[in-house]
Image (spheres, helix red, strand yellow):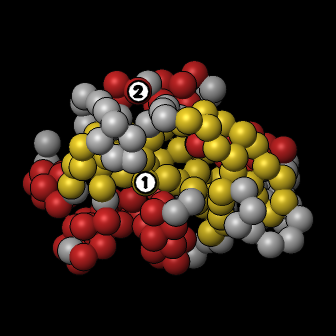
Amino acid sequence: MSYDECYVKSVIRTIQDWPEPGVMFRDITPIFKDPKALRMVSDALIQRYIDSEITHIASIDARGFLISSIMAYQLGIPLVLVRKKGKLPGETIHEEYQLEYGSSVVEMQLDSVAKGDKVLIFDDLIATGGTILAASTLIKKLGASVTEAAALIDLPDLQGSSRIQEAGIPVHTLLAYEGL
């Protein structure tokens, strides 16, 4: 593990039994209070995609917005939002998915992406993979393609990354946490 990975991991908090009993929540909010950690995370992701063919970043509600907006700005590409149902104005499409502790629905505006767009899906964390797979379905329904899914954290024990890869979407994460 590199110095940057160790440092960022030292900043992230683990909160037991939140939002449900038995869940070990990986809280990335301390990163936003630590400019050094935020720069390390942002720079690592920007460097990965600076020479890529992606044309858009589709960011998932809500912590993912904070890092992906920095990425989109630095890469000079549009940021489009994948939000919980009922949070976006205008015409939208939606997709239901399963969480590790329930189910939810995400939506995108109809004019977010179009045919020919090459989209990177970004979320703060990959658990079961349901959110990213739902976002991928929406992006494809709008005619665009998904080039990769990226996240700050992977929880490999929940097998979300494997499910995403089985769906034909490459996955990139900066950190992994074993155990639930």
Residue at the disc numbered 2: 158
Residue 179, horizontal then vertical, whole percent: 25, 28
Q: Can the viewer see residue 142?
A: yes
Is 45 in front, or is 21? 21
Q: Which amino acid does label 1 sit on?
A: Asp
Residue 106, horizontal then vertical, whole percent: 69, 51
44 lies left or right of 94: left
User: Which quadrant of the structure image shows residue 166?
Assistant: top right
CA gap between label 2 and label 1 equals 15 Å
Q: Which residue is drawn at 74% across and 68% down?
A: 88
Q: Residues within 10 Å of mark 2 (few under 14, many from 20)?
A: some
Q: Can the viewer see residue 176?
A: no
Q: Residue at x 61, y 38 (%)?
A: 103
Q: Report the quarter where the N terminus lies.
A: top left
Asked if disc 2 and disc 1 are in contact, CB closer than 8 Å, the reply is no
Residue 7 vertical position relative to residue 24 in the rendered view, above or below: below
Residue at the extreme right of the image, as rendered: 91
Is 48 in front, or is 8? 8
163 lies left or right of 157: right
Residue 43 vertical position relative to residue 12 in the rendered view, above or below: below
Q: Which residue is drawn at 22% across and 56% down?
A: 12
Residue 129, horizontal then vertical, whole percent: 53, 35
Q: Residues within 10 Å of mark 1 (few under 14, many from 20)?
A: many
Residue 76 vertical position relative to residue 27 in the rendered view, above or below: below
112 lies left or right of 70: right
User: Which quadrant of the structure image shows residue 114?
Assistant: bottom right
Residue 175, horizontal then vertical, whole percent: 28, 44
Q: What residue type is labelled 2?
A: Leu
Residue at the disc numbered 1: 124
